[in-house]
Amino acid sequence: MHEMALCESLLQSMEEAGRSHGFSRVRKVRLEIGRFAGVETEALRFGFDVVMRGSLAEGAELEVLEVAGQGWCFDCNDTVALEERLAPCPRCGGHRLHPNGGTGMTIKDLEVE
């Protein structure tokens, strides 16, 4: 389950931010997760609760914001919104698309004290 590893990396990032910015507790974490990132949200929520135990983020609320998928269409030379990774271009129907959005996971912001 790679979501546990994602949570461990998330904790490391929050600990580094806590040292840099002088906070000792995280109350809320807002994550942006792309539709094509390959992250199972429920597994991430479970892993978050487990990994954050005993840390500065123990008991923190996790809010997940989904980022829409995007792709560059080589046929119509435009960036288009995609519902599915392998969907055809909604503008021209072409199949030569390169995903260029909705593939990552980032911390949008933290509520801290």
Image (cartoon, rainbow, N blue to C red):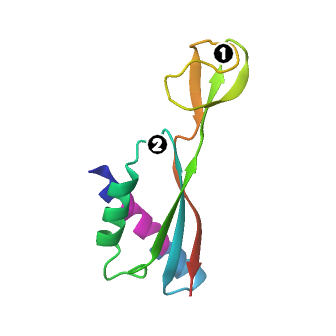
Give the total of numbered labels.
2
* Residue at the spot 52% in from the left edge and 70% down from the top edge: 29
Which amino acid type is shown beneath numbered disc 2?
A: Ala
Taking the magenta stretch, the answer to whether it contains residue 79 is no
* Residue at the spot 42% in from the left edge and 68% down from the top edge: 12
Which of the 4 quarters of the picture holds residue 73?
Answer: top right
Give coordinates of residue 55: x percent, y percent.
Answer: 36, 81
Q: Which residue is mark 2?
A: 37
User: Dot 2 lies on which element?
Assistant: loop
Taking the magenta stretch, the answer to whether it contains residue 9 is yes
Answer left or right for 8 relative to 74: left
Look at the picture and state if 5 lies above or below 75.
Answer: below
Given residues 83 and 77, the one toward you in this image is 83
* Residue at the spot 55% in from the left edge and 50% down from the top edge: 66
Q: For the magenta stretch, what is the residue range?
A: 5-14
Badge 2: residue crowd in 10 Å (few <14, some 14–19, many ≥20) = some
Answer left or right for 12 relative to 67: left
Which amino acid type is shown beneath numbered disc 1?
A: Phe
* Residue at the spot 69% in from the left edge and 13% down from the top edge: 92
Given residues 13 and 27, the one toward you in this image is 27
Q: Which residue is mark 1?
A: 74
